[in-house]
Image: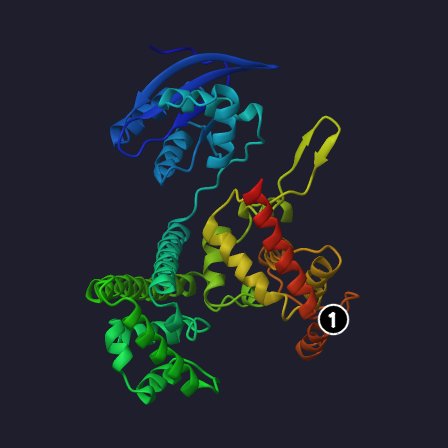
Amino acid sequence: MTFESSGPVAVGIDAAIVADHQVTLRRPEPGRPGVIVERFKVGSTVAGLSQLTERLSAFPGSVVVCEPTSMTWLSIQIAAERAGCEMSLIGTRHSARLRGALVGKHKSDVIDADMLSRAGEFFALDPTRPPTPQELALRRVVQLRHRQVVAQNRTHRRIVSLASWAFPDVWRPLASSRAASLGVLRRWPNLAGLSRARTATIAEVIAANTRGVSDVHRRAERVRDGARAWVEFWDGRLDLDALEWELFELLDDYDTARQRIGRATAEMTRRWEQRWGDDPVLMSVPGMGVITAPIVRAFFGDGQHLDDAKAAQSYVGMNPSNWSSGTVAQPSRSITKEGPEELRLAFYQAANAARMVDPQLAEFYRRLMVERGHCHAKATCAVARKLIGRTWAIITSGTPYEMRGLAGEPITRRQARQLVTDLAVPDRIRARTRSHSTATRRGRLAS
């Protein structure tokens, strides 16, 4: 069935990975949901995408709305552009809220396509700029690396959990150093073997994996004595060989993820340098380094697809959400997280480093911690939001970052370091925010 075109329509497409794409065409009507013109399916094959282009060609100027499901949206965007239509992506959080508001707990491909065709009634839809092949390749490497970082951290938490119940007296003297704790466990995965090890040998392993630690021999004694105590405690109650096998598997997973992170980092750096060279403009931003800069370029590119600093903050998902009902308004809630998590983490890490070298960011961070009572994470997110805006301004203008004092005057790096030192947050303030955060979490558990 075909329909004569009478102007643009709203197009919602539930993109599929292994099935067919579900498409809904809706004729908008002011103040009303509009009328569904047509529903149909197309395959994810070249033939199916050609069919999509043909069907949409009757409605040039229409906006096609998809969720960023895997990378299937890219082929749909190409098909839509060939039909003279624009593409807009809506985040999964927004779509989930919209689905809940329109249809409650029901979900199907048809429901999702119908819901996406109405997204323009509720959200401002910005055209999606397709990345260049070079940008897409760098972005894919960044995403792969991020997954391995997440996998490594999850494995480390499992190791911590295992050690915390199976031999906490061994783990606690080493917990302050991840390298030292993993080094000892790699050398002696069997608790009985560790209990028989010489103190000097344990101290050598700890010293080889730590720097500037003066009580290495004392730590080694505590580790060996703890191992002996737990071997005696578990006698006849726990199979230490099975514990060794489990620990060995976890360490192997950790080391595998670390190797993959190393390979992905090398490939990410190669592609970044191939496209941006030394990238002196971006590298001039405080907090940017050889890890964070490629991630920023993978998603920001030259920044021209973002209209202003606020759009950049919204793209990363670091802008605060808002909530209002009647006379009650909460304009500054938690961040939206409507953006690439790899980019959000990179800016968070960059902000944590930037506040220790940039006086303006250090003063902003201190004010949030001291006067507003924010915890470290919340204050760092606010610094990251400010850093995103500055980064966008730098890369779009092509002008290197200039360090400035609290009054906005240009200063040297040495002067900046001195100012940052004077703006350090007192330890008592950090202790207060930590205790407040702990009390808040406990209160939520009890409520």
Instruction: Tell me what residue is drawn at x 45 percent, y 65 percent.
Output: 291
Q: Is residue 264 left or right of residue 288?
A: left
Q: Is residue 284 left or right of residue 405?
A: left
Please tell me which residue lies in front, 265 or 410.
265
Rendered image coloring scheme: rainbow
Q: Quadrant of the C terminus?
A: top right
Q: Position of residue 446 (x, y in %)?
A: 56, 43
**Number of numbered markers:** 1
Instruction: Tell me what residue is drawn at x 22 percent, y 64 percent.
Output: 236
Q: Position of residue 163 (x, y in %)?
A: 35, 65
Please tell me which residue lies in front, 371 or 291.
371
Please tell me which residue lies in front, 415 or 298.
415
Instruction: Tell me what residue is drawn at x 49 percent, y 62 percent.
Output: 293
Residue sitting at the far right: 407
Classify residue 368 by image quadrant.
Answer: bottom right
Please tell me which residue lies in front, 240 or 342.
240
Give the SS element for disc 1. Answer: loop
Q: Position of residue 277 (x, y in %)?
A: 45, 67
Q: What kind of residue is marked 1?
A: Pro
Crowdedness near tag 1: few (<14), some (14–19) or many (≥20) residues, C-alpha within 10 Å: few
Residue 427 visible to the viewer = yes
Q: Which residue is mark 1?
A: 410
Instruction: Tell me what residue is drawn at x 69 percent, y 67 percent.
Output: 428
Vertical order, 63 against 348 (above or below): above
Q: Quadrant of the N terminus?
A: top left
Vertical order, 337 against 153 (above or below): above
Residue sitting at the far bottom: 200
Q: Position of residue 445 (x, y in %)?
A: 54, 44
Classify residue 353 by image quadrant.
Answer: bottom right
Vertical order, 39 against 355 (above or below): above
Residue 336 visible to the viewer = no
